[in-house]
Amino acid sequence: MVCPNCGALHSLSDNFCRRCGWNLGGAGVPAVIDERARALAPYQAERALAVGSVATFAVGALAWLVKRWLAARVSAPPPRNLPAVTRSQPAPTRAARTQTSEHVRVESYVWFRRIITFHREQD
């Protein structure tokens, strides 16, 4: 095979001239390769759309559940500061209850919770 540019001899398996670099093969390979032909698996738009829709729905549902869980945790009343009343001993008999005022001790616990809400007027 002879190079049309410089006239050098080449074998049939050469694609370019070794002397001048001229393309000996011509346009044997397409200039633009189709993206779908290059893919290892065929592209399916319907499947991709379905997977994306399901994933979007799942993320939205998870966000909704997390929001409800957080709202329940935040709006829960605070834990009680008072100890629980337990009856570990039996109630005293009637005769043992008679005591003078100097032996009686009264304890009172008062707990207040104040909630103030503000409402904005719509323009």
Image (cartoon, rainbow, N blue to C red):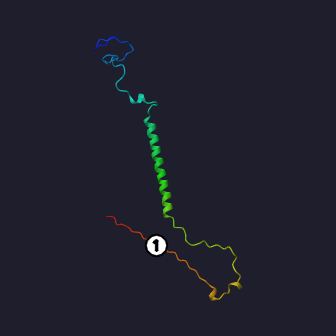
In x, y percent, where is residue 116?
42, 71
Q: Is residue 109 left or right of residue 20?
A: right
Residue appearing at x 34%, y 24% in the figure: 31
Q: Is residue 41 above or below residue 60?
A: above
In x, y percent, where is residue 20?
30, 17
Farthest-out residue, left:
5
Residue appearing at x 45%, y 42% in the figure: 52
Q: Is residue 44 above or below residue 121?
A: above
Badge 1: few (under 14), some or many (20 or more) residues near its Cα, within 10 Å? few
In the rendered image, the quadrant that contains the C terminus is bottom left
Residue appearing at x 62%, y 88% in the figure: 102
The quarter holding residue 4 reads top left
Residue appearing at x 49%, y 57% in the figure: 68
Query: Which residue type does callout 1 highlight?
Result: Arg
State the residue in front, 103 or 40. Answer: 103
State the residue in front, 70 or 27. Answer: 27
Give the structural element (helix, strand or loop) at label 1.
loop
- Mark 1 sits on what residue? 114
